[in-house]
Image (cartoon, rainbow, N blue to C red):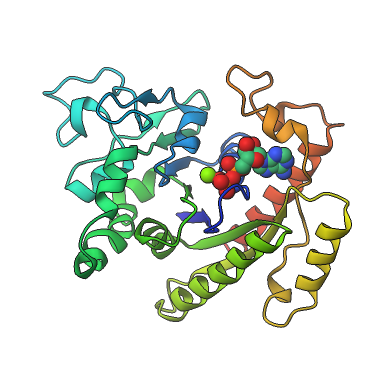
Amino acid sequence: MKVIVPANNKGGVGKTKLSILLSEYFSVVLGKKVLAIDFDPQCNFSQRFLSMEIDPASPGGKIPPIYPEYNPKEFEGIGPEGRSSIADIFFGGLVYPYETYIENLDVTPAHADRLLEAESVRRSEVLEKVHKQLGLFLDMPDLKEMYDVVIIDTAPSKGPLTISAIKAATHMVIPSIMEEQPIQGVYGMLQLWKQEALCREPSKPLKLIGVLPNMFRPINLHRDMLQSLRETDFVKQYIMPVSLGARASFSEVDAEGAKPESIFDLPDSSKAKEEALAVCKYIAQNVFEGD
Ligand SMILES: Nc1ncnc2c1ncn2[C@@H]1O[C@H](COP(=O)(O)OP(=O)(O)O)[C@@H](O)[C@H]1O
Ligand SMILES: [Mg+2]
């Protein structure tokens, strides 16, 4: 089972967008069994595939819908009120992935308050209580049998949840806009990757697929930034040869009730679709190389 994590501690660089594209590509285009996990308390990734609800206990926070056909007798260990989220792994609960309108794609959503609560444990306990939990969950034999690929969306942070996702990953991608602030995030993530990769057992490597230039525009700022990354030692070998332009279609498909729902349902003449296919294909080739 492959576990892919888009990460960058800067917000708005395309982590969620890439998580959505990869989930759709692996399930719809490649026919793989995919589990999408939302590890960001903002719940944007969950919202893409499920009708998330407003948390009455915490306005502004989102919670998953009640699990279909939930009844208290049959759903042992499920989250509060029969709402299942990935946060339940931090509270000794069981996770019940939700089916989506895509046949091969299941989702385990975020739960804003419970994820934040999980992350707020004492520093001395973070390692045991947060860092290791996702890895343990993904190591369950039943889960490994059910899914070929797991995509984990992360929050714009280097906090314990993001570390937990990186520790559970087999592959990492760093999306970034070609601008100063997001590129600082790239350097931070490259360091995190290196630290984690160095302490992995040889049989469980963490591969860096690379840095994905996103929302790329044909302006000097973006061209120059990309060029200078391609000339910088240590970084240059990680810049992916594919990129996503800043295109209206990428944000249009996110609107509620948008048609088509997916970039991959656009006509073949769409530039956005062409780029998304190239990026996802590149990532898929890297993920499955040697298999
Ligand atoms: N290549 C792109 N072209 C146009 N809009 C994009 C592109 N990538 C992302 N977006 C939009 O930019 C916003 C931020 O992207 P998002 O994936 O949510 O970033 P992050 O998860 O890193 O915070 C979203 O509204 C998304 O739809
Ligand atoms: Mg996001």
Please state which of residues 123 and 21 is positioned toward the viewer in this rendering.
123
Residue at (34, 38) in percent of width and height: 112
Residue 254: horizontal and vertical position, in percent?
A: 62, 29
Please state which of residues 185 and 20 is positioned toward the viewer in this rendering.
185
Q: Is residue 203 above or below residue 274?
A: below
Which image quadrant for residue 72? Answer: top left
Q: Is residue 66 shown left or right of residue 182?
A: left
Q: Is residue 55 above or below residue 272?
A: above
Residue at (64, 61) in percent of width and height: 181
Q: Is residue 25 visible?
A: no
Residue at (27, 42) in percent of width and height: 114
Residue 132: horizontal and vertical position, in percent?
A: 29, 63
Q: Is residue 50 shown left or right of residue 137?
A: right
Residue 166: horizontal and vertical position, in percent?
A: 44, 62
Q: Is residue 209 shown left or right of residue 33?
A: right
Q: Quadrant of the C terminus?
A: bottom right
Q: Is residue 51 visible?
A: yes
Residue 177: horizontal and vertical position, in percent?
A: 70, 55
Q: Is residue 183 shown left or right of residue 157?
A: right
Which image quadrant for residue 84? Answer: top left
Q: Quadrant of the N terminus?
A: bottom left
Residue at (80, 72) in percent of width and height: 228
Which image quadrant for residue 257? Answer: top right
